[in-house]
Structure formats: C-alpha cells, structure tokens
C-alpha cells in the first residue's frame, strides 16, 4: 500500500480585537481534526503571547492513502462539546489570498478511546496520540507553581523571622516580661483562619457573581481578569479584628477603638462596592462623598481619643514623638492630622490595589513595621497590628498572582483605617508615613499626574501626561514589567521601610 506525506500549514495572525485567527490549507478531515486538537492546547499560549507568529509547519508522514477517508473529529456532533456554546469558529482576514479557512476550538474535554489496539482505525490512533502529546504541555502548565506562590512564601518567611526576632528581644524594648510569641502567635492565627475562610468564601462570591468591574481606561492586559470575584475584605478584615480583640483581652480600650475605626472604614468601602455592583460599573460612591465620610470618621476618632482613658507613658494626650525633637504637643491640630491620616491611608491603599498581591503584601509589611514601633507605647496595639498583618497574608493565599479574588474597597479602606488608628492612638504619625511609603508614592503619582495635566492644559491648550498611566504601578506595568516583578520590587521596598519605621518609632519613644 502506497504511503504519502501530508503537510498541514497553520497560520496565526493577530486581529484588532485581540483574538487569534487560524487558517489551514485544504486537507483531509482527519488532518483538520488533528489541528483542532493541537490548537486546543497551543491556542491559548499563542493568544497570551501578544505577538504575531510566523507560519509554522506540522508534518504528518507515513500515512496510508486511505487514511483520509476514515472518521475524525469532524464526525463528532454538538453533544461532544466541539461546536455550539463550547466552541469558537474563526476565520482569517477577509479579502486576502489565503488558504481555506477552518478552525474549531473545543473548550471542553473530548472522549477518546481508552485503548488503542489493532482493531481501531489508524485515524483513531493518530488522533489519540496527538491528544496525549498536546496534553503533556497543558498538564505541565496546569499543575505548574505560579510565581505568586514563591512571592508569598518569601513574604511569609521574612515576616515570621522579623516577628520572632522582636519577640525574642521584646523584654529589652518594653522592659516588661511579655508572653512567648507575643506577636508571632496572633500573626499565625489570623493567617491560618483567613486562608481557610477564603477556601469557602471565594466560591461563594463567585456563585453570587460578585465580580470585579474594570474601567475601560485601565491597562488592556487586565481584561483577562474579568470575572474575578471581589469584596474579599468581607472575610479577612473581621478575622484580623476578632483575633486581635480575643488575644489582647476585652479590657483593651485602644484595640476596641482601632477595631471600630477599621470596621467603619470597611462599611464605607462595602457601600461603595455594593453601589458599583448594583450599577454594573466601577463608579460607586462619588469621590467627594467617600472622602467626606473618611474625614468624618477620622475626626470622630480624634474626638474619642480626647475623652477615652487610653494608657500612655507620657501621662498626656495629643503628643507626637519625633526623633531628635522629643515630644511635640499639637493640641487641636492633632484632630486635623488624624483626619488627614485616615483619608490619606484609606485612599493610598485603595489606589495601590491594582495588581495581584500588591496592596495586601505591602499592607502586611506596614502593619508589622507599625507593630514594632508602637510596642513600647501600647503592647495591645502591637497585637492588633500583628493580627491584621496575618489576615493580609492569609488573604494573599487567594490574592497572589494570579488572583482568585480581590479585596475591593471593603478591604483596602479598612486596612487604611486600621493603620491610621494605630498611629492616632500613639502619636506615631512619622513612622506611619515611613512604613506606608509605597502608598504615599502611589498617591503622589496621582496628584502629580492630575496637576501636570491641568497645568499643561492651561499653558499649551492641550493636557499632557507625566506618566503613561496613574497610579505609578500602572505606569511601570505599561513600561514592560510584568506583575510579579512589580510586586517583588514593592515588597523589597516595603520590607526596608518597615524596618526603618520600626527603628524610628523605637528611637522616638
């Protein structure tokens, strides 16, 4: 029986709507089925690459001449998941001298023979071999370790070593004997509970279709994240607050005040997320209304500080310890500083929450830095900061690259309120701005972008942009850096800032 060589040409072309088109030469139905099987596994990789690929050749040799007449993928009906809702039929560009156009991309698993023996047609054997060959690469990609796992492990290792070191030498800092694993224990408990809660909470939000809505002005690569659940702050913020209250004890006034401010900011963020979900766009509360509510909460918290019986080593309130300057009494200006910090921290973390794992990891490091700084003044607030840091790490188990859930405004505003409350109760605003250096930089990038645009519009008649996109992490992303590299860079910077904030806080006290 004569043998022949069949060559199948696969052409890939990028289209304007970012979908990939395929074209095949006139070939036998079995060869087209072979191409469909390979395209199922290699098509997504080609689409995600984002570059035009040159034509390639797939060569099938030593086939019988009657091989093209046997049944193939084309003989399967719609019930096998090849056509209808679970498939896409695409064509190449119109009006060009090209080959005959054909492609069916299956999106569900197909049934193949479990045994390939001599009683089966050779087309079935080739089809099964092609399917298994293509499955090898897909299986390796499916079970491969994501970069976010390594990033999270590095963050956890650094946090644990730092907290263990502080626990080991805490008696030198506080001059009082503290229980073993004073900061490490709430960190681990919150991290474990938050990671476990996410296992049940993420599918629940997904089933309720509480999905993140992206703005059209955002980076184009973020369109692949459509359909990701949001409002993750609903499960990890209450865990961090509850663990802190339980471990610190029911008599800690500072922890209760910080918890109340955190939950108040979480309520503002929840209202914003709900309005965005109901209106089906990414604009919930108006910016002025959201800012006004944050300032009101900050002002009320400051008035509460003036009346609450908070233990302080200074025997006075409204004091700000500064390195080399000592204690500075601000008086009524303390109220304005507190309100400003609440609004700045809430919006800072909210702006930073634009890349998988960026806001959660940097917030965890900021909480650790503040826990070290406030330890000599209020050891209970140090527990609160360690617990919130652990809750952020537990959330990162589901929010790291690639994220299965976003924290939403519910989580980002609550984290900002918690950090501001820790600073307001102790007067350590200077260490707060150091530990939150990444958030400060994000806010400044937005302010600079808006100011530069308005200034150039007045001068030249047309507004110009200082960055490609604000906040800063989007500008870096559009410059070509991928998300894991941006997150790692931010974590390294936040680690250094957390160490510096802790040191400055201890020296100031």
Image: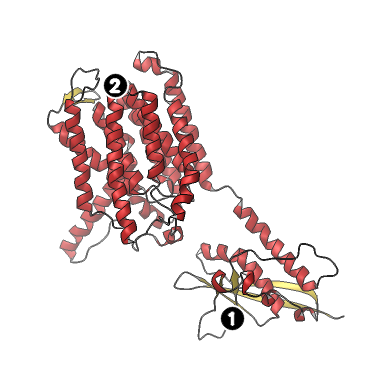
Q: Residue at x 20, y 25 (%)?
A: 308
Per the image, the residue denoted by label 2 is: 377
Per the image, the residue denoted by label 1 is: 101
Q: Position of residue 393 (x, y in %)?
A: 45, 38
Q: Position of residue 375 (x, y in %)?
A: 34, 23
Q: Residue at x 12, y 31 (%)?
A: 332
Quick one: label 1 or label 2, which is nearer the N terminus?
Answer: 1
Q: Residue at x 38, y 44 (%)?
A: 234
Q: Quadrant of the C terminus?
A: top left
Q: Residue at x 60, y 79 (%)?
A: 102
Q: Which mark is residue 227?
A: none
Describe the colour scheme in one phrase: secondary structure
Report which quarter residue 262 is drawn in. top left
Q: Quadrant of the N terminus?
A: bottom right
Q: Position of residue 153 (x, y in %)?
A: 52, 38
Residue at mark 1 to residue at mark 2: CA–CA distance = 73 Å
474 or 36, which lies in front? 36
Is 142 on the left-hand or right-hand side of 65?
A: left
């Amino acid at each position: 029986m004569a043998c022949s060589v069949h060559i199948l040409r696969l052409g890939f072309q990028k289209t304007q709507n970012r979908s990939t088109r395929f074209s095949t030469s006139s070939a036998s139905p079995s060869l087209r089925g072979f191409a469909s099987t390979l395209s199922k596994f290699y098509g997504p990789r080609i689409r995600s690459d984002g570059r035009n690929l040159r034509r390639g050749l797939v060569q099938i040799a030593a086939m019988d001449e009657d091989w093209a007449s046997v049944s193939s993928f084309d003989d399967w009906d719609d019930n096998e998941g090849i056509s209808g809702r679970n498939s896409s039929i695409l064509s190449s560009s119109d009006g060009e001298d090209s080959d005959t156009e054909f492609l069916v991309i299956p999106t569900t698993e197909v049934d193949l023979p479990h045994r390939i023996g001599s009683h089966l047609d050779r087309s079935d054997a080739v089809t099964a071999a092609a399917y298994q060959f293509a499955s090898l690469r897909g299986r390796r990609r499916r079970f491969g370790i994501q970069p976010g796992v390594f990033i999270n492990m590095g963050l956890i290792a650094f946090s644990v070593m730092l907290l263990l070191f502080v626990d080991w030498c805490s008696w030198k800092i506080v001059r009082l004997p503290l229980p073993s694993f004073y900061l490490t224990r709430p960190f681990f408990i919150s991290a474990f509970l938050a990671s476990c809660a996410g296992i049940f909470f993420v599918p629940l939000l997904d089933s309720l279709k509480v999905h993140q809505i992206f703005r059209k002005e955002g980076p184009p690569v973020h369109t692949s994240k459509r359909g990701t659940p949001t409002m993750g702050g609903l499960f990890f913020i209450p865990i961090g607050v509850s663990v802190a209250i339980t471990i610190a004890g029911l008599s800690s006034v500072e922890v209760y005040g910080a918890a109340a401010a955190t939950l108040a900011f979480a309520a503002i963020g929840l209202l914003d997320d709900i309005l965005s979900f109901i209106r089906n766009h990414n604009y919930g509360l108006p910016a002025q209304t959201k800012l006004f509510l944050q300032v009101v909460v900050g002002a009320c918290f400051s008035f509460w500080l003036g009346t609450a019986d908070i233990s302080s080593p200074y025997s006075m309130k409204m004091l700000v310890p500064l390195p080399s300057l000592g204690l500075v009494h601000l008086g009524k200006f303390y109220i304005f500083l507190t309100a400003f910090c609440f609004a700045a921290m809430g919006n800072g973390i909210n702006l930073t929450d634009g890349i998988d794992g960026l806001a959660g990891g940097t917030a965890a490091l900021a909480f650790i830095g503040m826990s070290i700084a406030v330890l000599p003044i209020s050891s209970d607030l140090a527990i609160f900061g360690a617990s919130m840091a652990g809750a952020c790490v537990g959330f990162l188990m589901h929010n790291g690259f690639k994220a299965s859930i976003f924290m939403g405004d519910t989580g980002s505003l609550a984290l900002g309120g918690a950090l501001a409350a820790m600073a307001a109760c102790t007067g350590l605003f200077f260490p707060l701005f150091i530990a939150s250096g990444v958030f400060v930089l994000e806010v400044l990038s937005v302010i600079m972008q808006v100011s530069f645009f308005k200034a150039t519009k007045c001068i030249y008649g047309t507004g110009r942009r200082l960055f490609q996109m604000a906040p800063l992490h989007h500008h870096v992303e559009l410059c070509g850096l991928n998300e894991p590299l941006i997150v790692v860079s931010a974590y390294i910077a936040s680690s250094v800032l957390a160490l510096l904030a802790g040191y400055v806080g201890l020296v100031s006290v």
